[in-house]
């Protein structure tokens, strides 16, 4: 095999391969055949709300990728569920409000009263105390994105599980294997379990993404145009794939407290994924050695960071330009 081989057929690996292909490179993706975190992910594109940490370099990378998303979605040429209605970030109790206030003040968004919030989303519980509208925080449907990327790449995606990089015959190997990156490279990528639910009902109950603190619990609710509603997510330092009674109870309780009308929706899916975390929960982007490049460890932001990762890694492969040094795999 010549050219570049991308190990990993998730949203990161496919996006990199797509960008390499669109720049005229010879590329093959080796897809291990398992659904990755993208299959579970809700697809929030939230550069502000998802960054608990305030590392300015990471925030800049998240914002840069958020800016790339409209063009990336358009380039794919099919509906990938890109929706720019925006996100309502909400707090239910005074303690929830105190917990959210720091992020909101960094985002410099005006605080909205309950009556104002209900003009945006009439289905919200009257218990919601305050919130902000983050117009820049959008959504995409990761399952549709992956389907579109696979279609564009066609026969360049090959079903093959890689257990050692020495088995990959290519001049350049890009490891974008999510949590599997640790076994292939020795880099510290750990699985962080997330349980996510999918509900389905009449379209139109909600229009915005909701991201809320509800009685001390974090929950997000992502409504799609077709009536699907994604509810997430637990965050557990665990490797198992169990959907637990407690996980489902906590997510449903928070979601139904926030939007009581969801009680009438059908519970269609209970899923588990593993976010690829790193010790500082920032991604690993860069060269490991002469032949091997890494693009992994995107933690809670794999969907958001796909376009910028694709551009940066294609730039490294084709132009020799290094991604920003704070994300170098050499830091561990
Ligand atoms: N980005 C949402 C999550 O990781 O749950």
Image: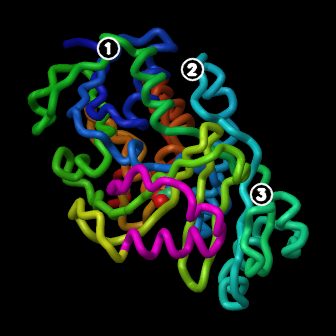
What element does badge 1 sit on? helix
Which element carries disc 2, helix, strand or loop?
Answer: helix
- Stretch in magenta: 247-274
Look at mark 3 in the image and give the residue it sits on: 134
Q: Which residue is mark 2?
A: 76
Q: Residue at x 34, y 16 (%)?
A: 27
- Res. 225 visible in picture: yes
Residue plotted at (57% across, 84% down): 216
Q: Earlier in the sequence, mark 1 or mark 3?
A: 3
Circle 3 residues within 10 Å: few <14, some 14–19, many ≥20: many
Residue 303 position, x and y percent, is 50, 44
270 falls in the magenta region? yes
- The earlier-in-sequence mark between 3 and 2 is 2
Q: Mark number for residue 156?
A: 1
Gap between marks 1 and 3 measured at Cα: 38 Å
**Residue depicted at x 56% and y 51%:** 229
Cβ of mark 3 under 8 Å from ligand 1: the answer is: no
**Can you say whether 41 is above or below 106 in the image?**
above
Q: Looking at this rendering, what residue extends furthest in the bottom direction?
A: 95
Q: Residues within 10 Å of mark 1 (few under 14, many from 20)?
A: some
Does 186 sit left or right of 220 as displayed?
Answer: left
Secondary structure mostly taken by the magenta-highlighted segment of the chain: helix
Front one among 247 and 256: 256
């Amino acid at each position: 095999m010549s050219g570049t081989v991308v190990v990993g057929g998730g949203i990161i690996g496919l996006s990199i391969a797509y960008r390499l292909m669109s720049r005229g490179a010879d590329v093959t993706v080796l897809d291990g055949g398992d659904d990755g975190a993208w299959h579970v992910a809700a697809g929030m594109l939230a550069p502000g709300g998802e960054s608990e940490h305030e590392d300015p370099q990471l925030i800049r990378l998240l914002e840069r990728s958020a800016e790339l998303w409209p063009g990336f979605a358009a380039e794919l040429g099919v509906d990938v569920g890109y929706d720019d209605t925006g996100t309502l970030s909400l707090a239910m109790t005074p303690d929830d409000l105190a917990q959210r206030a720091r992020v909101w003040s960094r985002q410099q968004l005006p605080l909205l009263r309950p009556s104002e919030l209900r003009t945006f989303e009439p289905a919200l519980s009257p218990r919601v105390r305050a919130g902000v509208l983050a117009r820049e925080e959008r959504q995409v449907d990761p399952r549709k994105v992956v389907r579109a990327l696979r279609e564009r790449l066609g026969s360049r995606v090959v079903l093959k599980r890689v257990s050692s990089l020495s088995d990959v015959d290519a001049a350049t190997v890009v490891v974008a294997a999510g949590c599997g990156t640790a076994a292939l490279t020795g880099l510290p990528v750990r699985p962080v379990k997330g349980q996510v639910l999918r509900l389905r009902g009449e379209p139109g109950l909600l229009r915005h993404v909701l991201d809320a603190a509800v009685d001390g619990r974090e929950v997000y609710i992502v409504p799609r145009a077709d009536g699907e509603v994604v509810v997430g997510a637990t965050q557990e330092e665990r490797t198992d794939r169990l959907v637990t009674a407690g996980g489902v109870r906590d997510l449903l309780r928070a979601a139904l407290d926030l939007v009581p009308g969801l009680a009438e929706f059908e519970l269609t899916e209970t899923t588990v994924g593993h976010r690829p975390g790193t010790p500082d929960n920032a991604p690993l982007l860069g060269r490991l050695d002469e032949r091997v490049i890494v693009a992994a460890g995107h933690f809670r932001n794999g969907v958001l960071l796909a376009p910028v990762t694709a551009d940066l890694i294609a730039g490294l492969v084709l132009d020799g330009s290094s991604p920003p040094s704070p994300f170098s795999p050499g830091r561990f």
